Amino acid sequence: MATDPRERDPATGGSGSVDEAHAAHLERSRTVWNRWSDWYEMSERDFEPMREAAIDRLDLRPGDRVLEIGCGPGVNFERLRDDIGESGELVAVDYSPVMIEKARARIDAHGWENVDVRRADATTAEFEEPFDAALATLSLAVMPDIPRTVETVYRSLIPDATFVVFDIRPIPDGPARVLNPVLRRFLRWYANWNPDGDVAASLEAVFERSEIVDTYMHGTTYTVVCEKRDAD
């Protein structure tokens, strides 16, 4: 189970070299995702069946309150909104100002009154009320501190809630692993991917249940379903 992380300035993440590295990663993320914001939706269309399958794993119901981490321009909003209905609530966070602008434009275009987008560092974000479920698609692996982000999500969920993650990683096994150095460099350039992070291990360390349920593209993309069990 997650433990409370050390208190840090939300704008920087800590002190000393950790503080500087965290801030530098966030600044690169802001720059990278502002730059790619116009092309993000085209990229997301390639992953749409995988994202839809991940959302299916949430098993959402009308009235549910959902958290989305790293929402980008809001490509998941319509499906999530359809599942939770008018009585539910979707709160989404992202760090890129341009992505936030595009996500809010999508909300305005659909007239959704129960979808809220906030600019925040997901490692330190705080929310007024807990959530019934959480989702992160192609976002957790680019966080500057993946374990702390996972802890943030865990604390933000009610007992027996589900967190579903769809993400990308180097080739996990087989002869094609020889391509991983090139793949790592590409992901670092394209998405500010965190080369020191391990999404699956971070999820397993915090949640009572964590399982990779789907893999695609030689295992480079995958879906993890996590459950926060009742404290009793």
Image: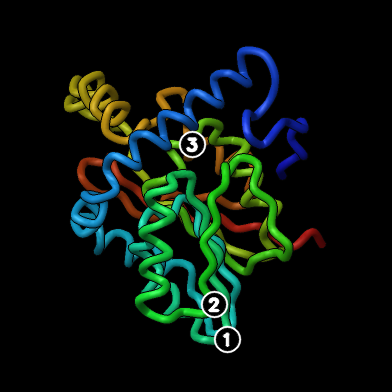
Kindly identify the amino acid type of the residue bearing the numbered disc 3.
Met
Which amino acid does the dot numbered 2 rest on?
Asn
Query: Residue at 41% of width from left, 34% of height from top?
Result: 29
Position of residue 160 in the picture relative to residue 213 (left or right) = right
**Which callout, 2 or 3, points to the residue nearer the camera?**
2
Q: Position of residue 110 (x, y in %)?
A: 37, 79
Nearer-N-terminus badge (1/2): 1
Q: Quadrant of residue 101?
A: bottom left
Tags 1 and 2 touching, CB below 8 Å: yes
Type of the residue with mark 1: Ser
Q: Position of residue 40 (x, y in %)?
A: 26, 50
In the displayed structure, 96 sits above or below 65; it is above
Residue at (25, 62) in percent of width and height: 48
Q: Secondary structure at mark 2?
A: loop
Residue at the spot of label 2: 114
The foreground one among 216 and 193 is: 193
Inspect this view and state whether residue 208 appears: no
Pointer 1 local density, CA inside 10 Å: few below 14, some 14–19, many at least 20: few
Q: Is residue 95 left or right of residue 137?
A: right
Which residue is labeled 3 in the image?
Answer: 143
* Disc 1 secondary structure class: loop
Q: Residues within 10 Å of mark 3 (few under 14, many from 20)?
A: many
Q: Secondary structure at mark 3?
A: loop
Alpha-carbon distance for marks 1 and 3? Answer: 31 Å
